[in-house]
């Protein structure tokens, strides 16, 4: 039977493993990742305010890999040989008959002074530092912002920043400490959250106004200092900075001949197949895919792309041409710790609901439902 290598241990990678095993009980599956663990990043928004601990969101995968019959290779990909049939890692080489690249993206951390900011998707340890810093602060300015990759508009992840912003605001109000803090939101975009749709932009800005959150919009970022955010239009004091930069491809892609988008991602077609590479597929943040300009970099899209990649790769093994595409669909709950705003977007519709406490609990229930597959 053929062997398939999956690079990564995130949303797209683990969905690919499940779908591969469901498609063929005897298929050989190799997974390459630095650690046999999965970080559930959507839940990290609750770490600073105590609703989650870091250990709640880091899921050991040894049991899941055993159930799936996976051979795990604790290593980091370094390159490819033989048109993708061999993955070169820092611990040796892994051969395959089919390859799915699902190792995520890399954040652009070139802004001067970026070391003075906390990266919201930088890992549970980073967000635990935010929690500890907030706990020791008696007041000050908290700054929340995001930017994109100018060469790849889709390579951004701004949604979690809104959730950290609104969640921390709600928590400070519950503690009776909100009046000691100034909260500020900044982004080079004139209309933040526009990937969520025009109604969402209006709703998010309206919510910031209701919460007395200062906004700095539409100006290119220049630098951070230990206590300051500097843009081309303004600069303001900041005692704590959470900043989500734009994304690009992983550095090891540079050691390959993989086709790349202007923003550095792996170019894929509508079937998630890497352009010009046989039996090599990509899913999630590693790839640049055809679709609407608002198509998100989020876990839900990664799962949909992984399903399509597996279906087409299994068809490849049987001599069929790729035929399964993925749906362009944005679904998210913008959580504020005690409530949530539901946003959905497809090519045919864009729905934004009023904030509702039930959506907060729905997001927590979904976390339990999603993670039970891997615990």
Image (cartoon, helix red, strand yellow):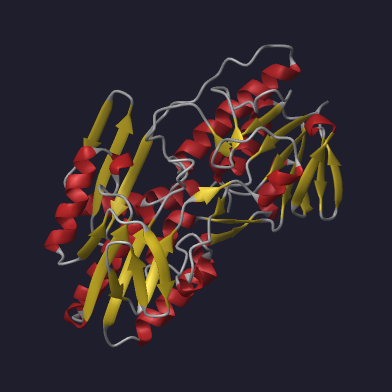
**Number of numbered discs:** 0
Q: Residue at 52% of width from left, 67% of height from top?
A: 124
Which residue, as the protein is rendered here, is positioned at the far left?
A: 210
Q: Residue at 62% of width from left, 32% of height from top?
A: 19
Residue 230 seen from this side: yes
Apparent side of residue 153 relative to residue 354 in the rendered image (left or right): right
Closer to the camera in the image, 216 or 347: 216
In which quadrant will I find the N terminus? top right
Apparent side of residue 102 relative to residue 187 in the rendered image (left or right): right
Residue 292, placed above or below residue 321: below
- In the image, residue 238 lies at what x, y percent? 32, 76
Apparent side of residue 55 relative to residue 333 in the rendered image (left or right): right
Residue 66 seen from this side: no
- In the image, residue 82 lies at what x, y percent? 85, 32
Q: Residue at 70% of width from left, 34% of height from top?
A: 258
Q: Residue at 80% of width from left, 30% of height from top?
A: 83
Residue 283, placed above or below residue 354: above
- In the image, residue 273 lies at what x, y percent? 63, 26
Q: Quadrant of residue 343?
A: top left
In which quadrant will I find the C terminus? bottom right
Q: Quadrant of residue 178?
A: bottom left
Q: Quadrant of residue 349?
A: top left
Apparent side of residue 82 relative to residue 325 in the rendered image (left or right): right
Residue 237, placed above or below residue 114: below
Closer to the camera in the image, 28 or 80: 80
Which residue, as the protein is rendered here, is positioned at the far top?
A: 320
- In the image, residue 367 lies at what x, y percent? 43, 52
Which residue, as the protein is rendered here, is positioned at the far right?
A: 92
Closer to the camera in the image, 3 or 159: 159
């Amino acid at each position: 039977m053929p062997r398939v290598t999956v690079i990564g241990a995130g949303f797209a990678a683990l969905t690919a493993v499940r779908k591969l095993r469901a498609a063929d009980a005897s298929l050989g599956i190799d997974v390459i990742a630095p650690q046999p663990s999965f970080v559930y990043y959507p839940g990290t928004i609750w770490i600073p305010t105590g609703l989650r601990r870091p250990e709640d969101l880091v899921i050991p995968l040894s049991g899941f890999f055993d159930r799936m019959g996976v051979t795990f290779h604790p290593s980091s990909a370094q390159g490819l040989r033989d048109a993708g049939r061999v993955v070169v890692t820092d611990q040796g080489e892994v051969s395959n008959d089919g390859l799915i690249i699902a190792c995520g993206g890399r954040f652009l951390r070139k802004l001067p002074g970026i070391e003075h900011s906390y990266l919201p998707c930088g890992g549970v340890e980073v967000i635990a530092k935010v929690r500890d810093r907030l706990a020791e602060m008696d007041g000050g300015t908290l700054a929340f912002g995001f930017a994109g990759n100018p060469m790849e508009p889709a390579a951004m992840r701004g949604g979690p920043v809104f959730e950290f912003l609104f969640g921390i605001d709600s928590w400070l109000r519950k503690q009776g400490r909100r009046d000691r803090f100034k909260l500020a939101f900044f982004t080079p975009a004139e209309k933040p959250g526009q990937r969520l749709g025009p109604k969402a932009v209006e709703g998010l800005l309206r919510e910031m106004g209701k919460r007395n959150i200062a906004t700095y919009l539409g100006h290119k970022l220049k630098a951070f200092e230990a206590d300051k955010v500097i843009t081309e239009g303004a600069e303001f004091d900041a005692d704590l900075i959470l900043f989500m930069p734009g994304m690009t491809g992983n550095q090891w892609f540079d050691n390959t001949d993989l086709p790349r988008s202007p923003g550095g991602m792996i170019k894929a077609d509508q079937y998630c197949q890497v352009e010009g590479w046989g039996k090599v597929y990509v899913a999630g943040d590693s790839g640049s895919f055809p679709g609407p300009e608002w198509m998100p970099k989020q876990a839900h899209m990664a799962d949909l792309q992984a399903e399509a990649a597996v279906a087409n790769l299994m068809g490849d093994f049987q001599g069929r041409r790729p035929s399964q595409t993925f749906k362009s669909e944005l679904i998210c709950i913008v959580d504020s710790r005690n409530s949530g705003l539901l946003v959905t977007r497809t090519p045919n519709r864009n729905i934004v609901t009023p904030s509702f406490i039930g959506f907060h609990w729905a997001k927590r229930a979904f976390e339990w439902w999603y993670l039970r597959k891997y615990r």
